[in-house]
Amino acid sequence: MRQLFFGVLFVSMIIAGPALAAEADAVIGEWYTKDSKALVQVYKQGDVYNGKIVWLKDPKNEDGSAKLDTHNPDETQRSQPIIGLNIINGFSYKGGNKWADGTIYDPDNGKTYKCKMNLNDDGTLKVRGFIGVALLGRTQVWTRK
């Protein structure tokens, strides 16, 4: 009886494993941020999900120069371009189309926030950055490219 139980458990894991991996990877792709100001490419690196800016609606300053990460608290990073900048880092899949335990960086103010993401039934991505607890934060809805 015990062997039967472990056999069934093993077969269930083999069948469910790829389905869970596919569900976890559903966040991978390119997402337009609020008002389509930027396009963020979400990718998997090892067991975590990160994302970088790959396009900006307004990529240049008024003088024609590329927008840089001028608000970064690390002065040595202020000369890096916004395009190519990693802004979401370290997310892990929690099941039920939810990713958490990550952070989001806001290049407009140079601050990093805790963050969680939920993939909605309509295919949009709800991204919530917060300080401390999720109640104290801001949510944006991103749309897939």
Image (cartoon, rainbow, N blue to C red):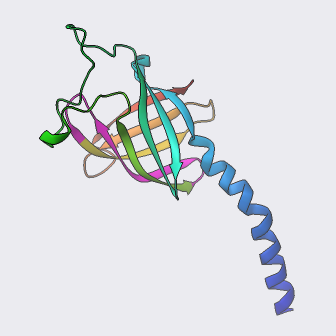
Rendered image quadrant of residue 70: top left
Q: Percent position (x, y) of residue 15?
A: 80, 63
Q: How many marks?
A: 0
Q: Is 41 drawn above or below residue 5 in the view shown?
A: above
Q: Is residue 100 magenta?
A: yes
Q: Percent position (x, y) of residue 13?
A: 75, 69
128 sits left or right of 131 in the view: right
| Image quadrant where one finds the C terminus | top right
Is 89 or 99 nearer to us in this picture? 89
Residue for point 34% across, 41% down: 129
Q: Is 8 drawn above or below residue 17 in the view shown?
A: below
Spot the residue most to the bottom: 2
| Image quadrant where one finds the N terminus | bottom right
Our reading of the magenta stretch's main secondary structure is strand
Rendered image quadrant of residue 78: top left
- Region of the chain picked out in magenta, as a range: 95-111
Viewer can see residue 127 = yes
Is 84 or 37 nearer to us in this picture? 84
Residue for point 23% across, 28% down: 108
Q: Is residue 56 magenta?
A: no
Q: Is 20 drawn above or below residue 7 in the view shown?
A: above
Residue for point 35% across, 39% down: 87
Q: Percent position (x, y) of residue 117?
A: 47, 43
Q: Is 100 drawn above or below residue 129 in the view shown?
A: below
Residue for point 20% across, 39% down: 77
Q: Percent position (x, y) of residue 63?
A: 19, 8
Viewer can see residue 73 = no
Is 93 or 53 nearer to us in this picture? 53
4 sits left or right of 99 in the view: right
107 sits left or right of 91 in the view: left
Rendered image quadrant of residue 120: top right
